[in-house]
Amino acid sequence: MKTLIFGAGNLLFSDEGFGVHFIQYLQKHYTFPADVTLYDGGTLGIMVSHMLEDADQVFLVDTIEAKGEPGDVYRYEKDDFMLGKLPIKMSPHQIGIQEVLALSEIRDRCPKKITLFGIIPTTYDTGAELSPLLAGKLPGLAELVVAEIAASGTPVEKR
């Protein structure tokens, strides 16, 4: 099973870059087999449709704007995207990703399993570092995603 872990965000706006920091965290702390791809999607949006369509399962990590407290993590599945069930306005990358998924679905190339882990940011101030609150969320979210990949039959090793 081909798995894509896709981190979205802009590293120049502190917590907005959470998804990219997440990919860097995974690269530093885990070893993945060849059928798992870690991808720094940055702000590419529709430019990455080929990455999504080549995977059987996709884990997206990005910041979201939702009710709750900074650092709260929400989980959304493919149906939430495709049926417009997301009751929130998400980061600027969401529009690109949703458009990509809609196009992929029309072309019958949309991955079977898509999961978004969205986190509420503390700040969008300029800066290349995460806030301490969101930096502290990286290990727990990494363990969650790694456990799901392992549950699908793909072994992941911690360094």
Image: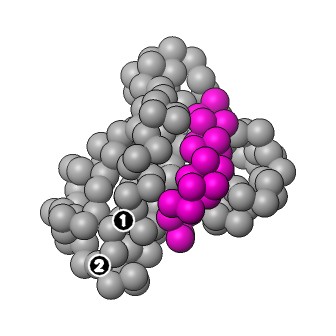
Report the magenta residues as a range.
92-118
Please provide percent x and percent y for residue 114.
Answer: 55, 63
Q: Nearer the viewer, residue 32 or 109?
A: 109
- Marks 1 and 2: CB-CB under 8 Å? yes
What residue is pinned by disc 2?
Answer: 154
Please provide percent x and percent y for residue 10.
Answer: 47, 26
Residue 83 shown left or right of residue 144 in the figure = right
**Quadrant position of the N terminus in the picture:** bottom left
**SS assignment at label 2:** loop
Residue occupying the point 31% across, 52% down: 38
What residue is pinned by disc 1?
Answer: 3
Q: Nearer the viewer, residue 150 or 121?
A: 150
Residue 77 shown left or right of residue 86 in the figure = left
Tag 1: amino acid: Thr
Q: Residues within 10 Å of mark 2 (few under 14, many from 20)?
A: some
Residue 145 shown left or right of residue 158 in the figure = right
| The residue positioned farthest toward the top in the image shown | 126
Q: Quadrant of residue 41?
A: top left
Q: Nearer the viewer, residue 60 or 130?
A: 60
